[in-house]
Amino acid sequence: MSFMDKVGEIGGKVYSTASKTASSIADKSKIVAERTKLKHKINEEKSIISKKYMEIGKKFYELNKNIMPETYVEEITAISNSMDKISELNNRISELGNETNCSSCKGKIQKDQEFCHLCGEKTGYEVNKTDNPEEVIEVSAEDIEVE
């Protein structure tokens, strides 16, 4: 067997081995990709389940917050306390700005609005008539001094 024949034979074996390795890597890559897709789909389903659990929990809370079943007193109380804190913090945020809540519809309104723009209810804020720049001041001839 000549030198060139041996080189050709070795080259053929290298090509065959490389081809098998590449094919094996491709097969494994396909498996990894498929596993990744399946895991992603599993996580999507778990997310749906978590959202549904939250919806069930919220409905349960709404139905039972005044009843307070003994088993859930701690959780219901914690949720109620957190909701009260959120409301208090939102009120503090409103106080810092020029917003408040309408006493009728609870919508956000400007503090200096005479009527709620959402429901039309009178807010209790009175426009100060003396601060109105369009106010007409009547002056009589007796009030004017001539020099």
Image: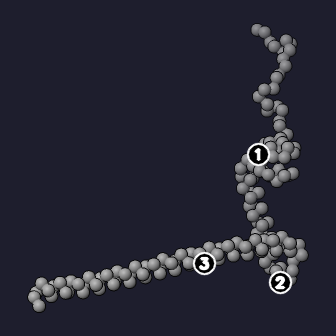
- Seen at 51% across and 78% down, the residue is 34
Residue positioned most to the right: 67
The residue drawn where x is 87% and y is 45% is 121
In this orientation, which residue lies closer to the viewer: 47 or 80?
A: 47
Q: Marks 2 and 3: which is nearer the front? A: 3
Give the mark nearer the N terminus: 3 vs 1. 3
Disc marking residue 42: 3
Crowd band around label 2 with a 10 angstrom C-alpha radius: few (<14), some (14–19), many (20+): few
Q: Specify whether 8 is left or right of 46.
A: left
- Earlier along the polypeptide chain: callout 2 or callout 3? 3
**Residue type indicated by callout 3:** Ile
Residue 134 occupies quadrant: top right
Label 2 – label 3 distance at C-alpha: 32 Å
Q: How many marks?
A: 3
Residue 137 at x, y percent in the picture: 82, 22
User: Residue 110 shows which numbered tag?
Assistant: 1
Coordinates of residue 54 in the picture (x, y in percent) = 73, 73
Residue that mark 2 sits on: 71
Mark-to-mark CA distance, 1 and 2: 44 Å
x%, y% of residue 43? 60, 76
Q: Residue at x 86, y 13 (%)?
A: 142
Residue type pointed to by label 2: Thr
Mark nearest the camera among 1 and 2 is 2
Can residue 96 be seen? yes
Please state the horizontal and vertical placement of residue 49, each as a whole percent of the image.
69, 76
Q: Nearer the viewer, residue 108 or 85?
A: 108
